[in-house]
Image (spheres, helix red, strand yellow):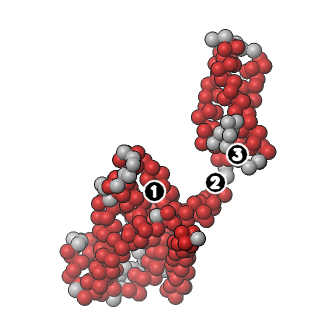
Amino acid sequence: MKQQDFETRNNPDWVILERWLSKVDSKKSSTINDNTIAAEQVVPMYRQLCHHCALARSRGYSPELVGRLNRLALELHHVLYQHNHRLLPQILHFLFLGFPEALRANARLVGLSAVFFLLPGLAMFIGCLVNNELIYTLMSPEDVWHFEAIYDPANAVLGRERASDTDLQMFGFYIKNNIGISFQVFAGGLLFGLGSVFYLVYNGLAIGGVAGHIVHLGFDETFFPFVVGHGAFELTAIVFSGAAGLRLGLALIDPGPYHRLTALRLAAKEAVKLIYGTTLMLLLAAFLEAFWSSSSTVPSSIKYTVGAIFWLMVLVYSLSAAWRRRGSQSA
């Protein structure tokens, strides 16, 4: 291809990228018109520009053209690379704006998920307090014995039996365990929501049953100080994961004007925002469980106080999102 034909075909894209760079440099407010592009379009156009640079060099086009394309590619690389380093501001923006917005948009599903999770858990907790044998309808004797050993006050280490010697290794174990539960609850939504309902109910029964059984044994002095801190983030994250899964299931049950696959894809874009938030919560829960909850040097009174603060923070954060949603609807 001659250089003139090459420039005629591709110059409009180069001009668009140059104008986009000018907007970024001048930090002007974004305006959508024929001469601008959305940020998500820049990356594929940048890759195409790199291909154009390689073609221009291999075909021996003029140094002026090669220089122009090289400069444009380098400037774009610098901007994109620089933006990738703004991780902390992006996380903070998501925590204070993006995640609450996702909770507001899915407030009813969050409430429904909480019902599926908390009501079976509460019922099983009360049932195991009244009848200590009820736990064996859900778990094997070996599993029950394992949980009894975990919270036995005679243990030197609080929490789950450690297969490793360091808190850091247990941190990795808790991450794997927590993320695994969250993924099951979320991915279960692909079964028209039934999988999410099943895992929410099952985990509610399991957690409530273990708690009731441990309290019945009189191990509450070790159990509650251990779980009160990280439980605020871990249990709430399970509920939010369930809401994300129910969002997928609802799209499959009632796709509206879309084909089911299209409706699922659209729902997944919204549901994944909830999963981003729950992942951050589960990482925090794993950190607390490994380094704070398992500590035998911190008095129980301090753990209860800190745990109450954590629960208050989570509840205020969640409920304020719902209140803002209600206010915006009534406005």
72 relative position to 201: left or right? right
User: From the viewer's perspective, is 169 left or right of 50?
Assistant: left
Residue drawn at (41%, 74%) of the image: 159
> x and y percent of residue 196 in the render?
33, 61
Depth order, front residue of 124/214: 124
Residue 67 in view here:
yes
Judged by depth in the image, the label closer to the viewer, 3 or 2, is 3
Mark 2 Cα shell of 10 Å, populated few (<14), some (14-19), many (≥20): few
Which residue was labeled with disc 2? Answer: 87
What kind of residue is marked 2? Answer: Leu
**Mark 3–mark 2 contact, CB under 8 Å?**
no
Give coordinates of residue 17: x percent, y percent.
Answer: 70, 34
Circle 2: element type: helix
* Mark 1 vs 2: CB contact within 8 A: no
Secondary structure beneath dot 3 equals loop
Q: Which residue is mark 1?
A: 271
Judged by depth in the image, the label closer to the viewer, 1 or 3, is: 3
Q: Residue at x 39, y 64 (%)?
A: 242
Q: Which mark sits nearer the N-terminus, 1 or 2?
A: 2
Who's the residue at 52% across and 75% down the image? 319
Q: Are marks 1 and 3 in contact (CB under 8 Å)?
A: no
Q: Residue furthest front?
A: 331
Rounded to the nearest whole Å, what is the CA distance between mark 3 and mark 2?
Answer: 25 Å
For label 3, the residue is: 31
Q: Label 1 sits on what residue type? A: Ala
Residue 9, compared with residue 125, is above or below; it is above
Nearest the viewer among 198 and 100 is 100
